Image (spheres, rainbow, N blue to C red):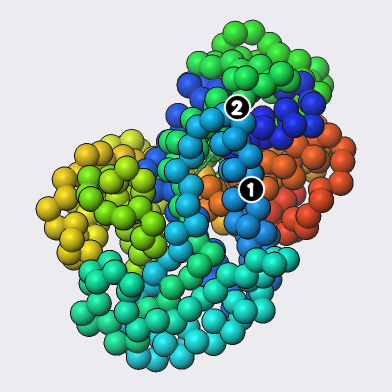
């Protein structure tokens, strides 16, 4: 999130300092999955519209950054397959196809929620026991998280208006003096955007009176990367919270656990073994594919589950940019553009759902 904010600050010509406690992109964004999954197209609302526009806008944003840096993000709008195990799910899916025809269009571009009888590639996924067919949506995509982060890092390292400071924890923020206390000394700011992942919640809470609950929590996730000779254009498979994603370069990612309680934030365990075993059943061609990496990270889940962005209701020069939870990669560019525009005192050129605003989350956490 912070990297995207730096990209927009550079484009707007705003002198910016990007301070990271470790090395850039080392947090939850350094994972393996990178699913860009739309909400279902039924019961349309402001959040779904925001996400739709963000997913459409990501493609040209990525193309621009790739052209500017000469690097690849591993992005592809490869679609998504959702098995419909029971016959009654088919009619629900057909109704949603009609909703997609209405809502999933942007100018000339149209995306579809197709209902199909079988996957286009036999075994991706296994169709036995699937009685209702499959949804094949053409809006979903994926990106390789580390490649995207590398592209963003390359961009900001060459930016004219962005200075990067790594391995420096922001410990305290003084709003009277407009200074941030870091291990390297105190840094003056005009506006301060807190994009510290799940660690943003306690940082923001320290400057907020009247809270009765935390502003958010970390939710652990574990995932795995397999080596497999699989066509990278195959759609992402999504079943019962399990993702199987074909990435470039003969990689397939399987994820993710969702753990509200955990003792070891960054280690993997038998819960990941179970997930990988389920992935191999879902896609038998992965039965013998070696696991080449296991990874765990902490997602930032805001109290109201939505992203948490925008100015603090009391300290207007403090802005939040966090709470992407499970959908950060599809939204981060738009959230960052909105927050940097707000910090610059401009008018955000697209609608931001009210429930995304920090002020809204603070109200929920103060009840
Ligand atoms: C297993 C797993 C699978 C996931 N799959 C997907 C997916 O498929 N699609 C999707 O969209 N999302 C997915 N997510 C969620 C996504 O990874 C996160 O929502 C996203 O990476 C959060 O980005 P962020 O920039 O808010 O936080 P982070 O990437 O965690 O970055 C926060 C940064 O802030 C720095 N920082 C923290 N505290 C301080 C401080 N005091 N001072 C200075 N710097 C500080 C950290 O060093 C870090 O670099 C997944 C997450 C996990 C764990």
Tell me the quarter of the image containing the C terminus.
Answer: bottom right
From the viewer's perspective, is residue 331 above or below residue 196? below
Q: Nearer the viewer, residue 355 or 79?
A: 79
Q: Quadrant of the N terminus?
A: top right
The residue indicated by pointer 1 is: 60
Per the image, label 1 sits on a secondary structure element best described as: helix
140 vs 359: above or below = below
Between label 2 and label 1, give the one nearer the viewer.
1
Whether residue 360 sits left or right of residue 199 in the image: it is right
Provide residue 194's location: percent of width, then percent of height.
Answer: 65, 33
Viewer-side residue, 16 vs 267? 16
Residue at x 60%, y 56% (from the top left corner): 55
* Residue 167 vertical position relative to residue 192 in the rendered view, above or below: above
User: Mark 2 — residue?
Assistant: 155
Q: Residue at x 87, y 38 (%)?
A: 345
Residue 15, visible in the rendered structure = yes
| Label 2 packing within 10 angstroms: few (<14), some (14-19), many (20+) | many
Q: Is residue 29 left or right of residue 42?
A: left
Residue labelled 2 has its Cβ within 8 Å of some atom of ligand 1: no
Which of these two is toward me, 231 or 32? 231
Residue lying at 45% horizontally and 36% vertically, measured from the top left: 147
Q: Is residue 268 visible?
A: no
């Amino acid at each position: 999130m912070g990297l995207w904010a730096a990209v927009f600050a550079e484009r707007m010509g705003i002198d910016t300092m990007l301070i990271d406690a470790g090395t850039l992109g080392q947090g939850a964004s350094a994972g393996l999955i990178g699913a860009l999954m739309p909400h279902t197209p039924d019961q349309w609302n402001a959040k779904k519209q925001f996400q739709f526009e963000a997913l459409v806008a990501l493609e040209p944003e990525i193309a621009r950054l790739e052209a500017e840096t000469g690097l690849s993000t591993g992005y592809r709008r490869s679609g998504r397959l959702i098995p419909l195990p029971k016959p009654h799910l088919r009619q629900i899916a057909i109704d949603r196809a009609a909703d997609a025809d209405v809502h999933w269009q942007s100018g000339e571009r149209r995306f579809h929620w197709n209902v199909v009888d079988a996957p286009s590639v036999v075994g991706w996924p296994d169709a036995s026991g699937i009685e209702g067919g499959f949804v094949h949506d053409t809006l979903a995509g994926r990106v390789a998280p580390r490649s995207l982060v590398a592209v963003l890092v390359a961009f900001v390292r060459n930016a004219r208006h962005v200075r990067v400071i790594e391995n420096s924890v922001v410990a305290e923020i003084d709003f009277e003096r407009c200074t941030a206390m870091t291990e390297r000394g105190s840094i003056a700011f005009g506006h301060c955007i807190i994009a510290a992942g799940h660690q943003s919640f306690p940082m923001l809470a320290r400057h907020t009176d009247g809270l009765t609950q935390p502003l958010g929590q970390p939710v652990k996730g574990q995932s795995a990367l397999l080596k497999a000779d699989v066509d990278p254009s195959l759609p992402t498979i999504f079943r019962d919270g399990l993702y199987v994603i074909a990435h470039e370069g003969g990689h397939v990612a399987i994820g993710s656990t969702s753990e509200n309680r955990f003792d070891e934030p960054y280690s993997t365990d038998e819960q990941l073994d179970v997930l990988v075993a389920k992935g191999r059943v879902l896609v038998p061609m992965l039965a013998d594919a070696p696991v080449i990496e296991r990874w765990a990270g902490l997602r930032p889940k805001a109290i109201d589950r939505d992203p948490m962005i925008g100015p603090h209701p009391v300290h207007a020069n403090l802005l939040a940019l966090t709470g992407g939870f499970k959908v950060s990669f599809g939204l981060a560019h738009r959230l960052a553009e909105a927050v940097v525009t707000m910090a610059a005192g401009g008018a955000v050129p697209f609608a931001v759902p009210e429930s995304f605003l920090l002020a809204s989350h603070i109200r929920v956490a103060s009840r």
